[in-house]
Amino acid sequence: MGADLEGRGRGARRGRPLRTGLLLGGCGALLAGCASMPDSGNLESVDASQRPDSQSQVRVYALPPREGARPVEIVQGFLEALTSDDPQFTMARKYLTKSASKVWDPEGSTTVLADGPNTDAGNAGNETDGSRRFSLTGQQVAKVDEQHAYRPEEATYSQSVHLSLVGGPGRKEWRIDRPPPGVVLGESDFQRIYRSVNKYYYAGPSGAGAGGAAGLVADPIYIRQRIDPLTQTVKALLDGPTNWLDQVVDSRFDSGTRLKDPDKSLTPDDQNRLTVQLNSRADGASQTRCREMAAQLLFTLQDLTPSGVEQVTLQRSNGSMLCVLSQSHAESVAVHRNAERPGYQYFIDDKHRLVRMPANAGSTAAPEPVNGSLGTGDQPLRSAAVSRDEKRAAGVSLDGKSLYTGSLFGEDTLGKAQVRSKAKAEEDRLSTPSWDGRGDLWVADRDPKRPRLLWLDRGEGEPVEVEVPGLDGRIEAVRVSADGVRIALLVEKDDKTSLWIGRVERDERGEQGERGEQGDAAQPRVSVLDPIQAAPRMEEVTAMSWAGGSRLVVVGRESGGVQQMRYVRCDGSVLSGTTLPGLTGVKEIAASESEQQPLVAHSDDGIVRLPAGSQWQTVVKEGSSPVYPG
């Protein structure tokens, strides 16, 4: 049976059979692997990635090298052991020399290849002189660093593995003395072994919510999902935010705060209450700070157990209680915008007015114009955005030239345009605007002569041109995350449009200049830094929207493919098992930060929405620019 599993889809191999370095366990059965292995020459791709049901809950156990194993078997066994559910890679180390095992750091990095590593024995060394070298090659798609942060990184992978004979006279065994750095495996094995988890930190001054309330920001990482994921995640949270996010978020855990006993597994009790004992760095924390730390833990751990963690107790290093916080009280400590549910969905109707309909997917209420000047139709609109508190809206005129803002409460008159584009062609003018969690407004002017990303403080005043160093191309669309510290941008270059995620940094001191000398408030300096491509395999991205703390829904196509919708993480990783029902001619897409709300789209069928577990449903035949607050 094992031979069938290993050899399926690759043709017959020549050579004598041997035992591979893996056992598969699951569904009540334990499957011992076996395959054919050539004695010399080239090895084929290590296709643990091609095992059947690689996404299912199959446990993979590594086996030690057999006595007298040839060099090719050692290399194969080591690479397969990297795909096992071995907590400390104990079996993988058995394929290494003692000195190599001491310096090899599997936690330092994980290299993800499209199809797993190919192995070439070449002509380097021979078994008679006591050394062999193999080349590992493949197409790299991403790396996970020591902070567990995923980054897309397409490149040609090439590393060497060196082996030598070790042991006493009369009994020498081949072992690897120079392994490749970290862990290397195929993409489907990566998706089977690892899972994405959101750590939560507080937005710094640049990301504070309206009124100064600090909100939480999701920091996605990847952990091994079957190796005590809860304890792994707590340790990663205590280690602090990833480097990319570190400049704009803050942890309430002081630097150096760790678990008192890092080797002890953390497990909730039968009432989903978790006790976490910290080292002495946390002993002097105030009750306020302790509750903020506990809130970080509660929101970070909410999806790691089947029923969630209901309560966290933090203890000092001597075991005394520091504080207790329940899930029901966590929202009063920290602003977690993913839990906020909007009251309405919005779009532009066939009369070019901003209209709304209840966000409840089961509602059958007909869309109605919003209150205020943007719902009258006096100024025809082609796109709009609604503030996250649903008190204000911004609309772009039908010709794309002007941006207006107005109240959604009571009657008001349309004021002067906040922004005007001078582009000659309508398609080169203003993008759909976007509000962040602070109540600030963003919009892109696509004028070919002067393309700009603009920011309006609280949606008012003079627009500030945002610096976007490191981004090559023209910004076509803008969506700011609810936390206000990340921005999604569709960028066009060479007739292709790609999705990028940038980090928003604000210097509130701004430029002093003449205004500052006259005593007026200085203009803040706003920048979007270190952009990351979030859907690198899509050749063309036509629409996108934030769909959670670190998740986006995107519409686009891969090279030579057809239009599709999928979920991606803001770190560029693709969420497996999240296929969306097909929809013809999607032009725009809208999702709520609350993952419980239905998707809304503008397609060839008009304005449609997708309730959870259902199919697309038509709302109206004519309409455009569907949006949720944000």
Image: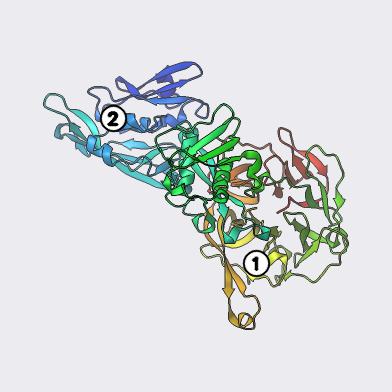
Q: Is residue 375 above or below residue 344?
A: below
- Total labels: the figure holds 2
Q: Quadrant of the C terminus?
A: bottom right
In the picture as drawn, the residue positioned furthest to the left comes out as 169
Based on the displayed image, in which of its 4 quarters is residue 422 positioned? bottom right
Left or right position of 168 against 607: left
Q: Quadrant of the N terminus?
A: top left
* Residue in the foreground of this view, choosing between 610 and 496: 610
Q: Residues within 10 Å of mark 2 (few under 14, many from 20)?
A: some
Image spot of residue 501 (x, y percent): 57, 54
Kind of element beneath mark 1: strand
Kind of element beneath mark 2: loop
* Residue in the foreground of this view, choosing between 499 and 392: 392
Amino acid carrying mark 1 in the image: Leu
Mark 2 touches mark 1? (CB < 8 Å): no
**What residue is shown at x 47% (from left), y 16% (from top)?**
29
Image spot of residue 247 (x, y percent): 50, 59
Q: Which residue is mark 2?
A: 94
Q: How is the image coloured?
A: rainbow
Query: How many angstroms separate mark 2 from mark 1 (CA)?
Result: 57 Å
Left or right position of 507 against 446: left
Image spot of residue 384 (x, y percent): 76, 58
| One can see residue 521 in this view | yes
The numbered mark at residue 454 is 1
